[in-house]
Image (cartoon, rainbow, N blue to C red):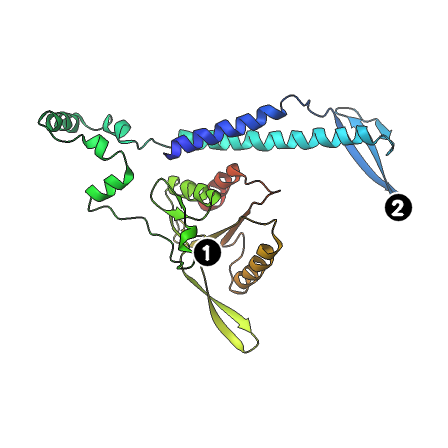
Amino acid sequence: MSILVKVESEIKDELRILNQYESVEEPNSVLICRKVKGKYRFSLRRKGEKKQKYVPIREYQKLENIYRAQLISEIRKAIQGNVKALRSLLDNLEDYDPESVAGKLPSAYIKLRETLETRGSKSILEEMSDPKGILQNNKTQKNFPQSENTKDRAGLKYRTSFGLFVRSKNEMLIAEALYAAGLEFWYEKRLELTVKSDDGYNIEVVYPDFTIKLPDGSIMYWEHFGMMDKKDYQEKNYRKLQNYLANGIYPPHNMILTFDGENMPFDNGAVWRIIHGQLLG
């Protein structure tokens, strides 16, 4: 599946979710909260007006509806931002399907292909329709560098369009975006950190999800934490972050952190905002 198809599919998914929220009207009032004698009091002010109307807490159903409407409004804005970012990405991508690329070759190459095939040669386009075929038949092309982490190699089960194997779908999306942006990067590249312990200082080897070389030659690390709803995972990576900080690696200076979990959906649009705002900006 090419990256264009993936992005188009992602746009459809985002629009499908957006459509589910379209039936809910936009809030026409602003919620105001004040603390009076240790208790919170809530009032509503219609947009464009100054007058406030107190809403007693016993009218909990009304307050729930106000909260729900505002929440859905913000969700809609986030999805609309994602769709805009994905469409912008789509405008800058090119289909690398052999059939599409072949149609753009100079006429001499088109005539050569036709001549070869009329003489009984196997269809070059069919042969190259699988990226593996391209690699096998083009000895000068180098494979994309794979993970240097020797642990849990079976976990590298998601393959990008350019042949890199990663551990999750969201890491695959990040990798595809970095690749499409033309950035040089490595997945799980070995990094040595100096870590303080009871017996002094030791070297600890870590494998950041992405090590990115920026246009100015500097290095940026990108860690994506994908199971933030699990306590043991949180504790393990909290220590990892402490070690990064102790070695002068911290956001936004030279590190990017993104998260997802059961109750923390991954924001695809944020990936492109990060790339254009922090890495290419």
- Residue 271 pos. (x, y %): 49, 41
- Residue 126 pos. (x, y %): 23, 31
- Amino acid on which disc 1 is placed: Pro
- Residue 263 pos. (x, y %): 62, 42
Which residue is pictured at 57% across the width and 28% down the height? 17
- Amino acid on which disc 2 is placed: Gly
Position of 41 with respect to 225 (left or right) is right
Neighbour class for label 1 at 10 Å: few (<14), some, many (≥20)? some
Question: Is residue 100 visible to the viewer in this orientation of the structure?
Answer: yes
Which residue is pictured at 51% across the width and 59% down the height? 249
Question: Is residue 281 visible to the viewer in this orientation of the structure?
Answer: no
Residue under pointer 1:
208
Where's the N terminus, which quadrant? top left
Q: Secondary structure at mark 2?
A: loop
Which residue is pictured at 63% across the width and 25% down the height? 21
Residue under pointer 2:
38
